[in-house]
Image: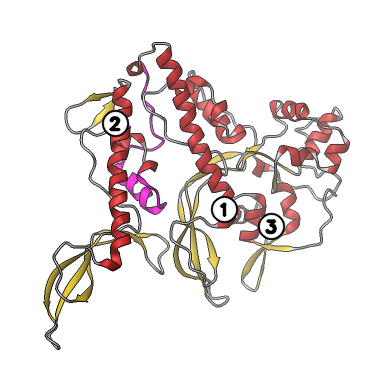
Amino acid sequence: MVEEVSRTLLTVDEFARLVGVSPGTVRNWKTSGALPTETVEGTTLVDYAEVAGRKLLRETELLNLPAVKQAQVSETDVTAAIVAGGIAPTAAPDRRYSINDGAALVAWKGGGSAVAVAGVPLEGGPQQNTDSTGAALECGPDHSGRFEALIEYVTVHADPARIPATFWDTRVCPEFVPPVGVFRAWYGGRGAEGDDSGPLQIGTAIGRSATWELEDGQLVQQPATDLFGFAEGDDWHEPGSLPPEYAAVSLRYRELERAWREAWLRRRRELLAAGVSIEALPHALAFERRDRVAAIERYHREHLSPADLPDWFFCTEECPPFVPPTGVFRFEYRESDADPYTGQPRTWVCSTEGWAQEIGKPGVSFIPAQRVHRAPGTFRSGATPPEHGAANQRYGLAEHEWREEWRHRVAFYRAEGGLQRQAGAVLMPK
């Protein structure tokens, strides 16, 4: 065998982390019968041996497997096997292969059929299901080639710079599409997790942005979730902060998002230098409809900043009304009265409306404007309570960032002739 390991049982979360998928995907495999599991004291467990068919390796790790190395399989051989459809790497978060793909490569090098042996372990042992690595995807007819280019990016190379230049020939930047297995994660609300089989565990929920996965050869979108994982323990985690175990994939998401926009900007500079009319380019359609309410819901759920909102959100004649980020509130003194028991003056401290991560709830909740507490003494209505100075400063900076983001987006497109005034309040790409 490639790896000699004793029989070890893993929890669903542990198995998901090893093979690079979400716990929900592992549960789907279990439900469909694609992944054998067993239940011990109410907990679902997976045999470590199942990792062999589903664990994803980088190309260098694949080529360093003992049997693959002994067969002198090269990068050229890997490419040839992919072209022939014998193996189909994923992008979780970049091009990855299962251990069993090594068997196909060894057969390929020896003159055999990579397709015929794609499910055979390298040196004997039980056959593993390799559908999780994804069969070759068949793309529908699309004469522009945009669909094929996008699918190749999502499932194979995960590099915006390798997407054909014509993909970026749009009036505004297309909305970012993460490759397979790439997502952002964040800490959510504190609460308890468990069932009737044991005591409740106190901890913090972990959320995850929408992503794509290959399941049985099919490209499937996994929607954003507030319950992607659960960090047990009494430690306080700031809502919206980054869980250490997902730091690498979250960083990759951000870097790919930056590279995506840079690829579009690079192409735009080329078109402008060549004298191409921006207004002659097609619209960059969003994957989902342009729903400002849905965009704001994501802005709050994923603890984003105004800079993370799509270009079309700010393509308006007037700046959209400021919506504070999650957890950002302004506090001020309001009405004063006398304490009915002591007769001493007191003043209410009130907060603006906003959105916050509440204890015991995984998602973000709307908090209406409300009275927070009374402060002894009389204070000018509208003044900032000293204890809330930092919070009010953050609110003011967020409001300034919102307006500056709108000014920047509109100025950018107007400068290049990419916006025109429409009837009503919306400035749409020409």
The boundaries of the magenta stretch are: 281-306
Q: Which residue is mark 3?
A: 36
State the mark number for residue 410. Answer: 2
Q: Amino acid at mark 1?
A: Tyr
| Sequence-first disc among 1 and 3 | 3
Task: Tell me which residue sits at (72%, 37%) in the image.
Answer: 59
Q: Work out how far the residue at label 2 is from the one at label 1, CA to CA, in angstroms.
A: 34 Å
Q: Work out how far the residue at label 3 is from the one at label 2, CA to CA, in angstroms.
A: 54 Å
Quarter of the image where one finds residue 412:
top left
Dot 1 lies on which element? Answer: helix
Select label 3 or label 2 by which is in front. Answer: 2
Q: Name the residue nearer the viewer: 148 or 330.
A: 330
Lateral position of residue 106 relative to residue 308, left or right: right
**Label 2 CA crowd tier, 10 Å (few <14, some 14–19, many 20+):** many
State the mark number for residue 246. Answer: 1
Residue 158 magenta? no
User: On the rendered image, what quadrant is the C terminus found in?
Assistant: top left
